[in-house]
């Protein structure tokens, strides 16, 4: 089902580039929010004291606190260094997902190229840090605990690792396409009142998909850094 998007009015864009334009729009908005939060933080009398009321500073304080707590729970204290990575993944995916709920806008995460790129990015990062932590001994994780089964386990584990970016990307893509398609159908059938229910459902799905992607990235990072294999 094809729907009109406002960005189609730009003469230098074609339908094949809309997801890139949507992604760049989200990056621009996030950059403004981060710069705004940084400015507020600089003006604070004591930046370490949490905000007493809701504000841009309070939003980012709570957001980073939640991501840090999740990282401590999944990866451990050594995962603190990866909090910027996990936070960036979550907020980038979340805002892209939410953009698809805006009438006349599309979500970059409804394009399989975007979601597979995100999956590949997560895959590269945790493997790079896995090699950085263990060196070539990192490959021992693929060989299992029994020596004579090592060749078979290596093949199975290698396939499992290579499937991870695909599963991350395709899961996100499938859920976003399904969610935004259902919302679009109900907007066409009954543009008043009824779609409100599906907007709440859409917000929940958008948030959960960003959460699931981030949690799985944390789990994979935890496994890559583990010394128990």
Image: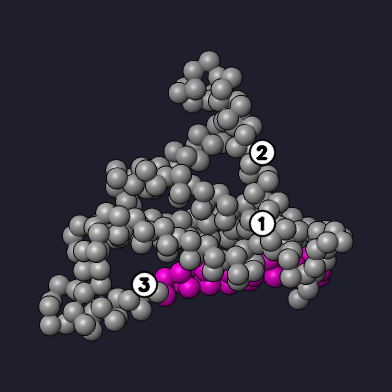
Q: Residue at x 40, y 42 (%)?
A: 68
Which numbered disc covers residue 114? none
In-image side of 69 versus 61 (left or right) = left
Give the spatial CA distance, label 3 vs label 1.
27 Å
Q: Residues within 10 Å of mark 3 (few under 14, many from 20)?
A: some
User: Is the magenta region chiefly helix, strand or loop?
Assistant: helix
Q: Residue at x 42, y 75 (%)?
A: 163
140 relative to 9, above or below: below
Counting from the top left corner in percent of width and height, residue 113 is at 60, 69
| Mark 1 Cα-neighbour bin, 10 Å: few <14, some 14–19, many ≥20 | many
Q: Which residue is mark 2?
A: 32
Left or right: 222, with 212 as reference point:
left
> Which dot marks residue 161?
3
Disc nearer the start of the sequence (3/1): 1
Asked whether residue 224 is drawn in magenta, I would say: no
- Is residue 154 toward the left or the right of residue 91 in the image? left
Residue 136 point in image, percent of width and height:
24, 64
Tell me the crowding category of disc 2: few under 14, some 14 to 19, or many 20 or more residues within 10 angstroms, Cα based: few
Query: Which label is found at residue 23?
Result: 1
37 or 103: nearer the viewer:
37
- Element under disc 1: helix
Specify the segment rendered in magenta: 163-190
Determine the residue positioned at 64% across, 32% down. 36
């Amino acid at each position: 089902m094809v729907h009109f998007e406002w960005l189609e009015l730009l003469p230098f864009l074609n339908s094949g580039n809309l997801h890139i334009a949507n992604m760049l729009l989200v990056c621009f908005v996030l950059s403004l929010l981060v710069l705004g939060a940084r400015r507020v933080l600089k003006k604070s009398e004591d930046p370490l004291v949490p905000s007493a009321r809701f504000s841009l500073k309070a939003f980012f304080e709570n957001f980073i606190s939640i991501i840090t707590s999740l990282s401590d729970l999944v990866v451990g204290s050594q995962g603190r260094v990866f909090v910027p990575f996990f936070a960036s993944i979550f907020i980038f995916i979340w805002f892209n997902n939410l953009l698809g709920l805006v009438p006349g806008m599309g979500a970059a995460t409804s394009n399989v190229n975007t979601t597979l790129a995100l999956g590949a990015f997560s895959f590269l990062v945790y493997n790079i840090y896995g090699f950085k932590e263990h060196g070539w001994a990192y490959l021992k994780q693929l060989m299992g605990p029994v020596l004579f089964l090592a060749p078979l386990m290596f093949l199975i584990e290698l396939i499992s690792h290579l499937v991870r970016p695909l599963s991350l990307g395709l899961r996100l893509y499938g859920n976003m396409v399904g969610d935004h398609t259902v919302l679009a159908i109900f907007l066409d059938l009954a543009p008043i009142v009824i779609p409100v229910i599906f907007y709440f459902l859409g917000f929940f799905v958008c948030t959960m998909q960003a959460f699931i992607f981030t949690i799985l990235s944390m789990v994979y990072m935890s496994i890559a850094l583990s010394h128990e294999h």
